[in-house]
Image (spheres, coloured by chain):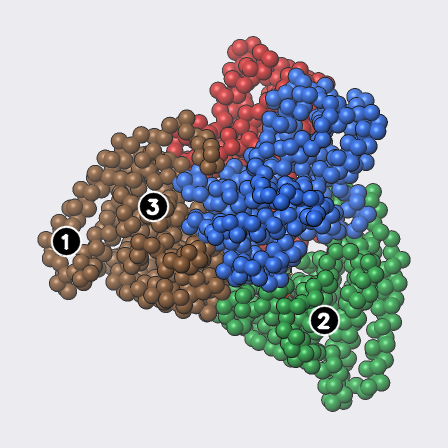
Chain colours: A red, B blue, C brown, D green
Amino acid sequence: MSTTYLEAIREGLWEEMERDPNVFLLGEDIGAYGGAFKVTAGLFERFGARRVVDTPISEAAIVGAAIGAALMGLRPVAEMQFADFITCGFDQIVNFAAKCRYRWNASVPMVVRAPSGGGVHGGPFHSQNPEMWFVRTPGLKVVAPATAYDAKGLIKSAIRDNDPVLFFEHKALYRRIKEDLPTEEYTVPIGKAKVVREGTDLTIVTYGAMVWVALEAAGTLAEEGASVEVVDLRTLLPLDRETVCESVKKTSKVLLLHEDTRTGGMAGELAASISESVFEYLDGPIVRVSAPDTPVPYSPPLEDAFLPNAEKVVEKARWLFRY
Amino acid sequence: MSTTYLEAIREGLWEEMERDPNVFLLGEDIGAYGGAFKVTAGLFERFGARRVVDTPISEAAIVGAAIGAALMGLRPVAEMQFADFITCGFDQIVNFAAKCRYRWNASVPMVVRAPSGGGVHGGPFHSQNPEMWFVRTPGLKVVAPATAYDAKGLIKSAIRDNDPVLFFEHKALYRRIKEDLPTEEYTVPIGKAKVVREGTDLTIVTYGAMVWVALEAAGTLAEEGASVEVVDLRTLLPLDRETVCESVKKTSKVLLLHEDTRTGGMAGELAASISESVFEYLDGPIVRVSAPDTPVPYSPPLEDAFLPNAEKVVEKARWLFRY
Amino acid sequence: MSAADLAHNCLYYMSLMREVEDRIERKLYRQGKIVGGVYVGRGQEAIPVGTALVAEPGDVLFPSHRDMAVFLIRGVTPGRILAQYMGRAGGVTGGRDANMHMGDLNHNIVSIISALAATVPVAAGAALALRYQGKNGVVFSYFGEGSTSRGDWHEGVNFATVQKLPVVFLCNNNQYAYSTPLSLQMACANVADRGPAYNMPAEIVDGNDVLAVYEATRRAVEYARAGNGPYLLECKTFRMTGHSAHDAAHYVPKDLFEEWGKLDPITRFEARMLAEGWGTQTEIDELRAAVHREVDEGVAWAEQSPYPDPATLLDGVYESS
Amino acid sequence: MSAADLAHNCLYYMSLMREVEDRIERKLYRQGKIVGGVYVGRGQEAIPVGTALVAEPGDVLFPSHRDMAVFLIRGVTPGRILAQYMGRAGGVTGGRDANMHMGDLNHNIVSIISALAATVPVAAGAALALRYQGKNGVVFSYFGEGSTSRGDWHEGVNFATVQKLPVVFLCNNNQYAYSTPLSLQMACANVADRGPAYNMPAEIVDGNDVLAVYEATRRAVEYARAGNGPYLLECKTFRMTGHSAHDAAHYVPKDLFEEWGKLDPITRFEARMLAEGWGTQTEIDELRAAVHREVDEGVAWAEQSPYPDPATLLDGVYESS
Ligand SMILES: Cc1ncc(C[n+]2csc(CCOP(=O)(O)OP(=O)(O)O)c2C)c(N)n1
Ligand SMILES: Cc1ncc(C[n+]2csc(CCOP(=O)(O)OP(=O)(O)O)c2C)c(N)n1
Ligand SMILES: [Mg+2]
Ligand SMILES: [Mg+2]
């Protein structure tokens, strides 16, 4: 019985709600309607209005209320209808939630789920990848699964985590990927990257929907005789620098890939980290493939040009091999 | 007649308001009171309530109103009382202002002034360096002057710019630095870094208050026989990658320094850029000195430990020279 | 304008909006020619029409996502709008943004962003600018009842009232925000109940009666133009569709659709026209046919408009670029 | 509690707050022992005292920056508070944060962040949790009139009223927000005028009369605890200082200080105590002396508390770290 990425998240929520009566959900249209993407479909029927709370259109209140409930010992999971709207609850996340523990030793075990990413012709406000706003904010954890397995395992870990976790679910993966998941319970640890393909000539470090692009590119490059290792970060903060650096030590070449725009993107942090820690192992520049520095355009030909794809990765990798 | 950094900003505002009747100011307590830091002192008396608008405590409305006025052809300069509160008007900046031109070709010639930075014992909410939230947002320009000369020249350029500009003024510099400014009018171009000290053995790239730390460190290192070049970015977006890379080509060693916390900081973007463009010139790892990944603590001994200083820079530089 | 001319205008723009949106939602979207979200204002046409017909050329309008008639009334052609939905270069945003996320300062229309009510403080700023510039324009700020829950709404309205700015706040209360009914959105019964919080006059009007909306808007605009500050107009109506083209609105009790269907602003107004003698059935039929032709032409125009050139992807992030 | 006991408590906590803050602002700050911002509630003590004395142990309090008595009433010692201001390890946040940015869940007090009104939605969430957990606690959410301009205030109050949560919203309307007078903050005359926007009862009380505040708070808390939803209490008062220790408040008309000085909540209440026979002058003098001693001890305790060890800088960003 194959499970989609979206169903995997729902299963994770469901299991945690069954397991722990302190877990509850809040967000816009998540109740009887089941959420804009139907991630929470069925949960209202199962758990009722007490544990699946429909809210007004108030992202600051959604996040704020989640913080308040978390401070009182509950485990709220807030949904942003689209990750793009997280900017409306921004102060609550980066100033309230992120700093409580450091400032006054108060736990905020809250999860904010945010459907992010492009490739769905959503245009500038339904396609963004806002992860870096949070990766640069100490006190938050940031998760961005690429597979159904990880999506389920990470949402469960996020809910059990005693720190605020931002959970970026990639919209383009919701129904596009399907996997057989274990029938027994499992979790996936926060803070651990995963080598999803082993290789010896080049490391591609990436996350989210781009993992699939990296794997496709790795396949193409394999046909050309290049052995490419793909590291899926899975968690962006805290960052598993070790797994990244170990891979670079092995391959000596690295390509950083993200769907997010270039300047200030995750690739920067990775480049700095790699250059600081394993500089002597590098035998070529650290290269990046990413979206360019523009808003996400709507029209399909523009969006296609905007998004990174396997072709662009392969081309950059070839350049690096020639270097 | 020496001018402080703070006075330089005030002079820049004043001159632009005299020059262009479309320039006006809005913010909390900026009128008769002259602003929390007195940057706008005297402007209300000179230009009146029409052009120096006191607002309610509403950062989203301040930024939003600035956008609306800018769309109508005015040149608003909004003040955040502290840069930390910019998170309350975040959506307006990153989603409204930043994307207008790309989406529908509408100019938003607005400036948001934001007193940022630590070293004033302000604690977690009056000391932050929020620049990277904006540097990763295409459509914005981000400026962070280190000297009175640049502060004045850049605020004038920011006001004349037809794109939204975030102007981070470092609170610790407000009254601490003083310079003789030209009596004739001048501006400083947005998007141009400056080599503020020439050297041949190491490049330190930095901005804001850390320019002074870098210069102090360069002085110490000079005594040890090392010739250090210091690049003051001045503008963080668009980033003057060329000046940075030219310097690295010359020195082959680079230390990236910022007061902002480490992960996701400006150093990452610089490291990626350097590694991509001038990798072959590097003869050592790209190293970083920054604040650690914590909120900004209040208590002086903690804040002192948190902030980068010349000692930490010198130590890191020595390590790099030994490499 | 004579009563008959006004009536003709009202019917024309309501019908044109209806037809453009029907074509978008029921044809082009289903044909896959429109990708992404489609939100229509079916059943609510009296609101953008009754309000925007009051606007002077110097007034600045901030339509929301169910106010298409505002564009039509200001002279944006159906072709450009249809091309917008289809992501074509000839669309209002040239393919950069989707659906109702469009604006054109040549027509004094500012584009919404997706975040609801984000335009409210921006509208206040535009009003500040009009007054600053010594113009006597009024700003029209549109939103749904659900959007009044947002902090930006509050901050924008508060700032506008403190500054006594020339803004009319135009709320379409269609009783749902996506799947969320009024009772889960606010504890008060009417959006107009929020007026006193800002010491702002607030009026409730039948949002399915285009002339009632028109008259109320005139009062509101006159008040604002005279320098008295903002005015809130709550237009009671009903969303006769799902939230968007992919939403079947199972959560809406069926009888509400039936009940409100009887109050369809176009059907109702046609009857009124005949009753008042503002037009004949023949004229109405001709108007309908003309609207059809106009939209046919718009669709043809839009379909021949090319997709934007990917080579332009990087252009226009900044002025110089 | 007898009327005399209540009166004694009121006077004790008002005096203690006054004395702690005087010591902070007029001594320690000027001696350079406190770096960073200092905001006091001089002249407003009746509000935190009259409200917090109503709170049950299970109630959760969200004091703002002029509500120090809330901490004292909940059992946070003057020493810990003074150490907090001085950035010492013994302070409530151990030197991590400054002044009134402190909280302690052992006392059911949640720390504000600096962004005004950000606690309002958080307070709503805490109230949701109390109801969820089947507890019958009430949440006390404090803010100044200026903070009601913030979007978070609106969103939090709206959510709380929609959900009928057990929150009392306690506004100190001291007529200034930093240098900004009420008239530039809101167009309505009273914060209570905002109640109807949320279909929430709103009451105005003399914020310089501790017993009036106490009685009104009892009404509010009873209403909320009974499950009727939020209640807004506007306590009219006046900020008898500058915004912070470095602000001389030149922008406040001098006669306002004089006028309101006559209404000082402590002086007034002492007179009332004598008049009602709730205490004698001797008892009052003794209370004052005891408060002095307590604060002396607190200062001594704080001064002997070490600064935090820089080696702890990185601790506690996350649970595990
Ligand atoms: C800040 C924000 N949150 C969520 C959404 C998603 N969303 C789009 S329209 C809508 C409902 C809007 O309701 P209302 O304001 O009543 O307008 P209506 O659609 O009924 O005309 C929602 C929740 C959004 N666009 N912006
Ligand atoms: C979002 C935000 N903007 C600005 C400030 C700066 N600030 C601190 S207190 C204050 C005035 C607060 O006024 P009010 O809410 O009336 O409380 P009061 O100080 O009068 O008790 C301001 C503007 C802030 N803390 N948060
Ligand atoms: Mg609605
Ligand atoms: Mg006040």
Q: Mark 2, chain letter?
A: D
Compared across the picture, whether C72 is left or right of A311 comes to: left
Mark 1 belongs to which amino acid? Ile
Mark 3 belongs to which amino acid? Asn
Q: Mark 3, chain letter?
A: C
- What distance separates the C-alpha of mark 3 from that of mark 2? 55 Å
The one nearer the camera, D32 or A263, is: D32
Residue at 56% x, 56% y: name it: B27
Residue at 25% x, 57% y: name it: C264
Q: Is residue C317 above or below residue B22?
A: above
Q: Quadrant of residue B208?
A: top right
Q: Quadrant of residue B203?
A: top right
* Callout 2: CB less than 8 Å from ligand 2: no
Residue marked by disc 1: C284
Residue marked by disc 3: C106
The one nearer the camera, C260 or B75, is: B75
Q: Is residue C244 visible?
A: no
The percent position of residue A145, horizontal first and vertical second, equals 57, 34
Residue at 39% x, 48% y: name it: C110
Numbered marks: total: 3
Residue marked by disc 2: D42
Residue at 86% x, 76% y: name it: D289
Crowd class of label 3 (few under 14; some 14 to 19; many from 20; radius 10 Å) = few
Q: Can you say which quadrant of the picture contains the N terminus of chain C?
A: bottom left
